[in-house]
Amino acid sequence: MKAVLKSICSLCFMVMVLPVAHAKTLEVTDLAGRAISVELPVKRLVISEGRYIPLLALLRPDDPVADVVGMMTPLSWTHPDLERQLFERFPNARDIPLFGGRNEDSISVEKIIDLAPDLAIFGLNDHGPGTKNAELIDQLTAAGTKIVFIDFRADPLNNTLPSINLLGQLLGAQERASEYGAFYQDRFDVIRERVATTDTRPTVFLQAHPGRFECCWGMADGMLGPFVGIAGGLNIADAVAPGPTAQHTAEFLLTENPDVWIGTASGTYDEFIEGGDPVALGAGMTDQMASESLTRYLSSPEFAALDAVRTGRAHSIWHNFYNSPFNIVALEAFATWIHPELFADTDPVATMETIYDRWLPFELNGVYSATVDHTP
């Protein structure tokens, strides 16, 4: 496992913000290690994914999309309820043009250029354009658009706070970025310090999209996979198939018989109501619905025989935490499930409520984690 136990705070220095000769220019180093000079204030901004809107809302809740002139995908792709609230509170958000679909191949560079953005915010490695899209980067740069890469997906443990810090500087929201960073860091440090007091490492299988794809895709070295180690567990997928994700057989799962099973639920309320297979969490879901959805999925023979299911140590977490500045909620949940005796006073639900109450101009709706019903 990568050396991820070093303090996140120290990694914030990956993002260097230095004033240069011109009073309204910042020279920054983004998460791809690229040095860029950006004229401030940014007046026209494009983002690769609508899922970055909650990050913009965290930094500037009075009008998250004030200068957003385009994005690749709508927020409804990952969070339709939040998009509904966004449109109600900030009607101008309805008019933001889209310049692509659900992957980098769908992007129209011509549309982006026509939008004449000062700045483009892209992810290192998500569904939008990444650092390997050299032609797109060259075309936008030639058109006068500065590109900055952030990351909550490829290496969220190390890149979450630097990404927030970088955008805080670029968007004139340094104070809010620092406040949220301190909130995040405090919770991260509690987990790291308590885990350091025990030598016990329960085995964990972290399954992506349970019910949406054929069994069983495990997260390992990337996305939420390394969160298992920080939370004090041993990720069994990482030992046999290093990499972000890999498919494992049901026989592998039964043979390894992990102490804890966690699924990243991508099912929705509508899919649950219609009786769909994907494990569901998110807006509209209640605690009872969430547990029922998970329990229904885990009732099949390949899962029902697992000790984790029989003893109530099988859980679901909202899939979209894997690419979110709010992934601290997932880390806390993992810690409480892997070492319940160490984290009896840790409440991930309260943490998410605090994030909404203190930093977001939206109401929290729905349930974002669940535990299997193992009543005899």
Image (cartoon, rainbow, N blue to C red):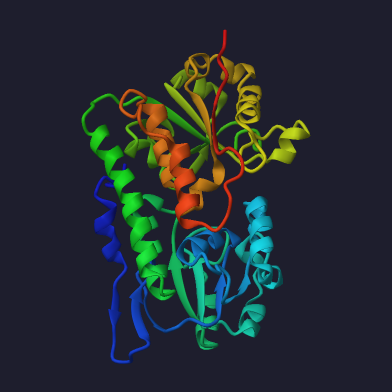
Image-quadrant location for residue 65: bottom right
Q: Nearer the viewer, residue 179 or 136?
A: 179
Query: In this view, which residue lies farthest toward the top?
Result: 376
Q: Residue at x 63, y 18 (%)?
A: 299
Residue 142 percent across, percent down from the top left: 52, 87
Query: In this view, which residue lies farthest toward the left?
Result: 197
- Judged left or right of residue 318, residue 114 is right
In the depicted structure, whether residue 356 falls above or below residue 36: above
- Judged left or right of residue 294, residue 164 is left
Is any part of residue 298 visible from this angle?
Answer: yes
State which quarter of the image contains the C terminus: top right
Q: Nearer the viewer, residue 234 or 18?
A: 18
Q: Which of 125 and 294 is in front in this view?
A: 294
Q: Which residue is drawn at 38% across and 28% down?
A: 338
- Judged left or right of residue 233, residue 269 is right
Residue 1 percent across, percent down from the top left: 31, 41
| Tally of numbered discs | 0
Residue 216 percent across, percent down from the top left: 57, 32
